[in-house]
Structure formats: structure tokens, C-alpha cells
Image (spheres, rainbow, N blue to C red):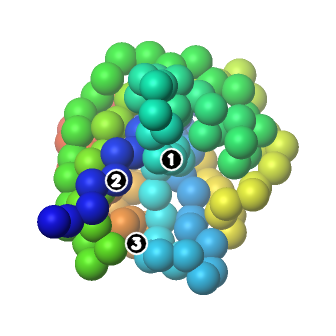
């Protein structure tokens, strides 16, 4: 039976741009870009997971908003079920990067220029028609 990995991800907006992060060397899908977030822990909601992960990985306080969409992809290490939420933050400054090589703030129409992880691709397509 395939392992299921439940993940919360954020479309984090600040000043009309969206936060994206590049996965670290040595991790699954190294150097791929993704919407920041992380794995759901037992007993927490996806909204709680997203806020916790952004604090742990970037020291970035966020306000989680509405659910945007879900996406799933079967990788060789398991099925990732990605639950994506809109979120906002007060500053574009990222105090720390513990789990990523780098981050960028980009416009929604620039997302397709980056090499994203497969589970993120449907989200990019859905965002392409939205004004953020």
C-alpha cells in the first residue's frame, strides 16, 4: 500500500506577490520550487499546520485565509496530498531559512517560469487566471 503524506501549503501574498521557496540540496526533489508549507501532524488542522510550518521553517508569522484547492501526486516515495490555502504576512522579510535554499516573491504570472514540484503544478495553473 502506498504511503499517503498529507501536506498544507500556502499561497502567501504580500504586496501583490506570492512567496515561493526552493527545496534544499539532498532532500527529495532537491532544488524544485514549491509553495511553503509542510506535513500535517496528528491532531492539527491544515490551517494550524501551515502556520506552524512557516514559523518553524522561516520564522514567518502568517494569517491563514480561505482554502484555495487540493492537489495530489504519486511520487516514488508515496502519494502527496497537498491542501492549499491563501495566507498573508506583514513583511516580505524572511528571518530564517531552515529547510530551503532560497526564497523569492513573484507575481502570479511569473510562477510558470520556475521548476516546481509536480504536486504544485495544478496550483500554478489555477493561479494563472487569478489576480492576486
- Residue 31 sits above or below residue 55 on the image: below
Q: Give the residue furthest to the bottom.
A: 26
Give the percent coordinates (x, y) of residue 4: 27, 55
Give the spatial CA distance, label 3 vs label 2: 21 Å
Q: Nearer the viewer, mark 1 or mark 3?
A: 1
In terms of secondary structure, where does tag 1 sit?
strand
Residue, x 62% and y 72% (percent of image)?
24
Q: Give the residue furthest to the left.
A: 1
In terms of secondary structure, where does tag 3 sit?
loop
Question: Does the image show residue 124?
Answer: no
Q: Nearer the viewer, mark 2 or mark 1?
A: 2
Q: Are marks 1 and 3 in contact (CB under 8 Å)?
A: no
Give the spatial CA distance, label 2 vs label 1: 10 Å
Residue 22 image-quadrant placement: bottom right
Image side of residue 75 versus residue 32, left or right:
left
Q: Which mark is residue 5?
A: 2
Residue, x 27% and y 78% (percent of image)?
76
Q: Which mark is residue 38?
A: 1
Residue 83 image-quadrant placement: top left
Q: Earlier in the sequence, mark 2 or mark 1?
A: 2
Badge 1: few (under 14), some or many (20 or more) residues near its Cα, within 10 Å?
A: many
Q: Which mark is residue 115?
A: 3
Q: Give the residue furthest to the right.
A: 95
Residue 127 image-quadrant placement: top left
Amino acid at each position: 500500500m502506498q504511503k499517503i503524506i498529507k501536506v498544507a501549503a500556502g499561497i502567501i501574498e504580500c504586496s501583490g506577490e506570492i512567496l515561493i521557496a526552493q527545496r534544499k540540496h539532498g532532500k527529495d526533489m532537491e532544488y524544485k520550487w514549491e509553495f511553503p508549507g509542510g506535513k500535517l501532524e496528528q491532531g492539527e488542522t491544515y490551517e494550524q499546520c501551515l502556520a506552524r510550518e512557516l514559523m518553524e521553517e522561516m520564522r514567518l508569522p502568517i494569517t491563514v485565509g480561505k482554502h484555495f484547492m487540493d492537489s495530489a501526486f504519486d511520487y516514488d516515495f508515496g502519494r502527496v496530498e497537498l491542501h492549499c490555502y491563501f495566507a498573508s504576512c506583514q513583511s516580505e522579510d524572511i528571518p530564517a531559512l531552515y529547510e530551503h535554499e532560497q526564497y523569492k516573491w513573484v507575481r502570479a504570472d511569473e510562477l510558470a517560469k520556475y521548476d516546481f514540484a509536480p504536486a504544485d503544478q495544478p496550483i500554478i495553473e489555477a493561479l494563472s487566471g487569478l489576480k492576486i
